[in-house]
Amino acid sequence: PYRSYWRRMFLEDTPFKFTGLAWLFMGVANSDAMLYDDEIQEIIKNYPDQFRVDYALSREQKNKDGGKMYIQDKMEEYADQIFDLLENGAILYVCGLKGMMPGINGMLEKVAAGKGKDWKEMQKDLKKKGQWHVEVY
């Protein structure tokens, strides 16, 4: 689903002009499985201040504990920035396999607690404001 967002924001000629930051965290097993990479690299080249991509390559990268690198691990590397963006109105979309949600929620809960926040309450507020969207299968 996220591909349609970046296409609308950066590639399609529409009256809508995206002026914010789109930050994609993409998780795949290997670098040869990075979907739409040519398209993504074109957008990064043309919109370097508006489009950012970080990959979690589970069979090629290690997380801080030496284990496989998953989305939650890659997001945790940028936890302060992510929380700052959310507190300033950013919208977070999580798309993919439902099996990744416990890891993502666990990481966000741990980071929130470290900031003196309750993730469940914060998540509820983000949902209410339309800032938290999950599309998993």
Image (spheres, rainbow, N blue to C red):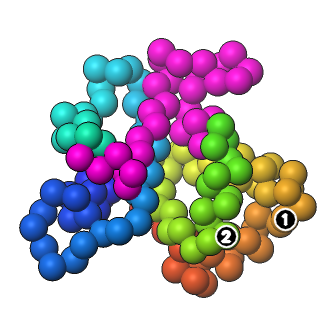
Q: Percent position (x, y) of residue 5?
A: 28, 62
Task: Decide: is 18 above or below 127.
Answer: above
Residue lying at 50% horizontally and 24% vertically, measured from the top left: 58
Membership of 62 in magenta stretch: yes
Q: Which mark is residue 117?
A: 1
Q: Is residue 118 left or right of residue 53?
A: right
Q: Percent position (x, y) of residue 113?
A: 86, 56
The image quadrant that residue 117 belongs to is: bottom right
* Residue stretch rendered in magenta on the structure: 46-75
Q: Percent position (x, y) of residue 94?
A: 48, 56
Q: Is residue 47 visible?
A: yes
The image quadrant that residue 126 belongs to is: bottom right
Q: Quadrant of the C terminus?
A: bottom left
Disc 2 element: helix
Q: Is residue 40 visible?
A: no
- Which three-letter amino acid code belongs to the residue tagged 2? Glu
Q: Percent position (x, y) of residue 30?
A: 38, 20
Residue lying farthest to the bottom in this orientation: 128
Residue lying at 23% horizontally and 46% vertically, measured from the top left: 46
- Which three-letter amino acid code belongs to the residue tagged 1? Lys
Residue lying at 30% horizontally and 69% vertically, measured from the top left: 18
What residue sits right under mark 2 in the picture?
A: 87
Task: Decide: is 66 above or below 81.
Answer: above
Membership of 126 in magenta stretch: no
